Image (cartoon, rainbow, N blue to C red):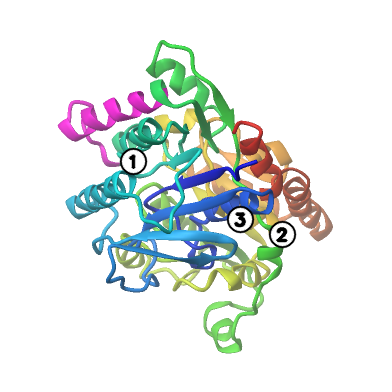
């Protein structure tokens, strides 16, 4: 029997060691273990990391884990919110179009193509590949564009780019053989978007036990510089971007400082708005901003946190759910999660590993934080351990890959 070939395509897929966008690489490795030939096709440039090597060839193929990674040469992006980012989408799509029409001899023709947004425009190339190769076409929705863009940036629904993206989104829903997503209630959004029948499967964010176990310790000088002793530490990890309401975190810290001086916020990560956030917090002594560290050191960092957190905007898009990778990192670290969020229930509620308060409500967040701080240590520990148990029993990539394979 001929070995089935899978193309996993996303402009923003990253090798796992470089950050949170490793979903396709983990799934691809699992496909390889089960006898498929799998490729991850992505861009050589990514605004989420500065560690991607400069690429000369238009198409470069090399092994990442068990997977043949196909890097299409892109243009450098400085900001997540810019015309430069839109241009980078077009460059990626042009390279991908050429790959589909004039296939590189090192890349076998696909039986299945999984297009994982963003970029949403890749849906069009995914459909073209389906027609050219007579393969099955899966549309994986990681972020509900353009709805998220409207909510976060305030763009009008009548903005020509938004109108175009909405047309592409609906086209994907209508023409995919299967729509998948780590967003649990996306089915409702699709039903609101198109009238024809569709097949939807929820495939959540996952984790790789082997990858997570290969952790490294923080350097002693790092701990001495950034991690305060004798404090109740509230940790945040991830990108500092518009999608998260980190201004609220500053306000929470500001109100707590005179009342609870032993509470300290640690913010680990980089992003477009980090400098502005640091400026807003320059008069505070209970919050520390930490540069990005290797993914392999994140679990050691989280071990020093008493509570971990995330702050979401009050976005209409969140009524369909959320799927941030940081929640998986938090739960693997067995840490209780305190989240500011209004929307469809998350894995924090499903696993009972923390508390969720309404978005934009500083008073509710600080009350909940004090509630967690006052819990006996064994209760706080048990809360965090429920999250890890949920992760271990339900969210390994090997389990999630089987969901995909059953659809192939």
Q: Residue furthest right?
A: 378
Q: Could you tell me how far apart the alpha carbons at marks 2 and 1 are, in whole angstroms?
A: 30 Å
Secondary structure beneath label 1: helix
Say which label, 2 or 3, has the lower sequence index: 3
User: Residue at position x 61%, y 68% from top?
Assistant: 262
Between residue 170 and residue 367, name the one nearer to us.
170
Q: In the displayed orientation, state which residue is furthest to the bottom.
A: 221
Q: Which residues are magenta?
A: 153-173
Disc number lying in front (2 or 1)? 1
- Mark count: 3
Foreground of the two, 254 or 354: 354
231 vs 151, left or right, is right
In this rendering, the answer to whether 207 lies above or below 145 is below
- Residue 238 visible (yes or no): no
Residue 300: percent from the left, percent from the top? 65, 72
In the rendering, at what x and y percent does residue 159 appear? Answer: 17, 31
Q: Is residue 311 left or right of residue 158?
A: right
Q: Quadrant of residue 394?
A: top right
Tell me the mark number nearer the camera, choosing from 2 and 3.
3
State the residue position of label 3. Answer: 29
Give the residue displayed 44% in from the left and 42% down from the top.
Answer: 116
Q: Position of residue 294 (x, y in %)?
A: 52, 73
Whether 361 is among the magenta residues is no
Label 1: how many Cα within 10 Å (few below 14, some 14–19, many 20+): many
* Sequence-first tag of 1 and 3: 3
- Which quarter of the rendering shows the N terminus? top right
Local secondary structure at mark 2: helix
Quickly name the residue at label 2.
209
Q: Are marks 2 and 3 in contact (CB under 8 Å)?
A: no
Quadrant (top left/top right/bottom left/bottom right) for the C terminus: top right
Please tell me the numbered disc located at residue 122: 1
């Amino acid at each position: 029997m001929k070995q089935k070939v899978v193309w996993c395509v996303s402009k923003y897929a990253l090798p796992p060691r470089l950050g949170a966008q490793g979903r396709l690489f983990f799934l691809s490795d699992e496909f390889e273990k089960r006898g498929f030939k799998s490729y991850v096709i992505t861009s050589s440039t990514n605004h989420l990391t500065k560690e991607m090597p400069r690429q000369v060839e238009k198409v470069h193929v090399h092994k990442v884990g068990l997977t043949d990674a196909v890097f299409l040469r892109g243009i450098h992006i400085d900001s997540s919110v810019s015309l430069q980012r839109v241009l980078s989408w077009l460059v990626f799509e042009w390279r991908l179009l050429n790959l589909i029409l004039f296939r590189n001899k090192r890349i076998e023709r696909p039986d299945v193509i999984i297009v994982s947004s963003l970029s949403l425009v890749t849906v069009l190339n995914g459909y073209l590949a389906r027609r050219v190769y007579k393969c099955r076409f899966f549309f994986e929705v990681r972020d509900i564009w353009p709805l998220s863009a409207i909510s976060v940036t305030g763009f009008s629904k009548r903005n020509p780019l938004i109108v175009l993206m909405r047309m592409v989104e609906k086209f994907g829903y209508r023409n995919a053989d299967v729509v998948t997503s780590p967003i649990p209630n996306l089915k409702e959004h699709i039903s609101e978007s198109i009238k024809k029948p569709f097949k939807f499967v929820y495939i959540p964010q996952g984790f790789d036990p082997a990858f997570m176990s290969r952790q490294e310790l923080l350097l002693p000088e790092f701990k001495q510089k950034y991690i305060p002793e004798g404090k109740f530490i509230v940790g945040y990890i991830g990108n500092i971007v518009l999608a998260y309401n980190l201004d609220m975190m500053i306000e929470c810290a500001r109100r707590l400082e005179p009342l609870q001086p032993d509470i300290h916020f640690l913010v680990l990560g980089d992003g477009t708005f980090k400098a502005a956030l640091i400026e807003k917090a320059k008069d505070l002594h209970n919050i520390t901003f930490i540069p990005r560290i290797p993914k392999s050191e994140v679990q050691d960092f989280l071990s020093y946190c008493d509570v971990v957190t995330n702050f979401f905007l009050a976005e209409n898009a969140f009524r369909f759910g959320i799927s941030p990778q940081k929640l998986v990192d938090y739960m693997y670290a067995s840490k209780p999660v305190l989240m500011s969020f209004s929307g469809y229930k998350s894995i924090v509620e499903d696993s009972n590993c923390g508390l969720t308060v309404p978005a934009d409500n500083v008073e509710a967040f600080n009350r909940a934080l004090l509630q967690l701080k006052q819990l006996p240590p064994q209760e706080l520990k048990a809360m965090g351990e429920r999250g890890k148990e949920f992760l271990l029993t339900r969210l390994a990539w090997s389990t999630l890959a089987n969901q995909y394979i059953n659809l192939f």
